[in-house]
Image: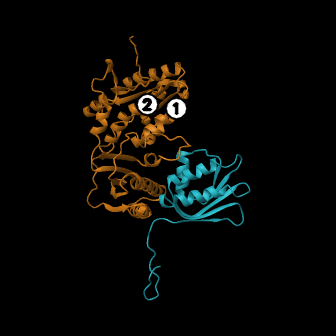
Amino acid sequence: MTDTVTTREAFVHPALFYRGAQQYVAGTVPFVLAGLAAGEPVAVAAPPDRLQLIRDGLGARADEVRFVDMTEAGRNPGRIIPAVLRGFADAHRDGRVRIIGEPIWPGRTPVEYPACVQHEALINAAFTGREVTILCPYDAAALEGGVLDDAWATHPVVIDEDGETASALYDPEAAVARYNEALSVPPGAETFFFQGSGQLSEAREFAVGHGERMGLSGPALEDLALAVAELTTNSVIHGAGGGTLGIWPEGEYVVCQVHDAGRLMDPLAGRRPQTPTRPGGRGLLLVNHVADLVRTHTGDPGTTIRFYLAR
Amino acid sequence: MDVSLGGLPAAPPRHGARLEAHPLSERPGVRVVGEVTLDTRRAWQEALGRLAQHGGTPLHVELSEVAFIDVAGVTDLVTAVRSLPKGQRLVVHRPPPQMARVLDIFWPGEGRIEVAP
């Protein structure tokens, strides 16, 4: 007996390479309208000027669409899956959901970019089997060629002016690995070695003291305390009982990182929204929520989580 | 016992966080002193567990002397509130700033916890 199994992946994740406003509108507005016509909930998360183009193109129907400023909600790429994409998709579970998500724009810095690619790659694992369509526009005229090469690796399908092409270069795991870059503490950083739960308070107070001296105050300083507590607690529980904390100023940010000997085996750690009744597993998610950027490195020497807070 | 020289008390050694819980005298609930971290989580959970034994509504948790609470500590509070009988509410007094932040991120609209500044 022959079993014919048709595997049609429920999750659809095309990249849209556009050049100029006209192509942007042509690639996004009909996509939104088709979703609305099918009765699908639609959200658009993009930089404000792009949101405006889509709003203008939709006219009165814009009221039926949820618009999200990606430069705010998605400033930290690690927050986009839990807070923006799954936030919207999980709230509409009875049928297909349609989202435009533009996480990479020309202003993204070299420090942010590796986290952006990893985010794009991990969308595939995060939504496997889900009735969700996420279209990711790329400004092909302004972004460097290497960015588009990465988009071919993180999206199974690419749409451009020539139409729709299945990507022969699609390999999201390789893209995650390619940007799994070592994160060393720069010279001059303040460092603190902690071992055991008895030093968690000291580690937190060390970070808060230096963070304040480096220019953090108010809610940002409280977020620093929270993030450091979560990361150092993770190190004590999962990372050989301790680790190293580093903190330093960098441009408009205070940067803090925690390194331990553990190995982060779950690439989606910190990117799954937790159901409200689940008792644990919110540490990395918290850091993704409060930080302006989170970078991670995991490998043989252990795991490093680095986060940035604007001062 | 610490050996003090010249009558001066030795500085207390830092062996992690501490947490004490005392029943409130004037209303049903508990006053907590210290900080809520991995080291003190069990004491915190026990204090919250005893809340249900108090009669009266709402129940009060006085946290003005709690310097810090981590995400697990806030999770315990939410879990405790959800295990209370229907109709019971909890008022948290002067919590450390992290509590509102964590509630807002993970449990927006948790109506059974009222935060009193």
Kind of element beneath mark 2: helix
Tag in front: 1 or 2: 2
Q: Which residue is mark 2?
A: A127
Locate residue A105 relative to residue B57 in the image: left or right: left
Name the image quarter holding residue B107: top right
Could you tell me which residue is drawn at 71 percent across and 54 percent down? B58
Point out the residue furthest to the front here.
A1
Q: The chain drawn cyan is chain what? A: B
Chain A, hue in figure: orange
Residue A15 badge? none
Point out the residue furthest to the right here.
B56
Q: Quadrant of the N terminus of chain A?
A: top left
User: Hey, what amino acid is under mark 2?
Assistant: Phe
Q: Is residue A66 above or below residue A77?
A: above
Name the image quarter holding residue A204: bottom left
Tell me where residue B28 appears, x and y as whole percent: 70, 60
Q: How is the image coloured?
A: by chain
Q: Is residue A34 above or below residue B70?
A: above
Could you tell me which residue is drawn at 27 percent across and 26 percent down? A169
Mark 2 or mark 1, which is nearer the start of the sequence?
1
Could you tell me which residue is drawn at 37 percent across and 23 percent down? A23
Q: Which residue is mark 1?
A: A66
Q: Give the spatial CA distance, label 1 vs label 2.
A: 20 Å
Q: Is residue A15 above or below residue B17?
A: above
User: Hey, what amino acid is under mark 1?
Assistant: Arg
The chain that hosts pointer 1 is A
Locate residue A13 relative to residue A275 in the image: left or right: left
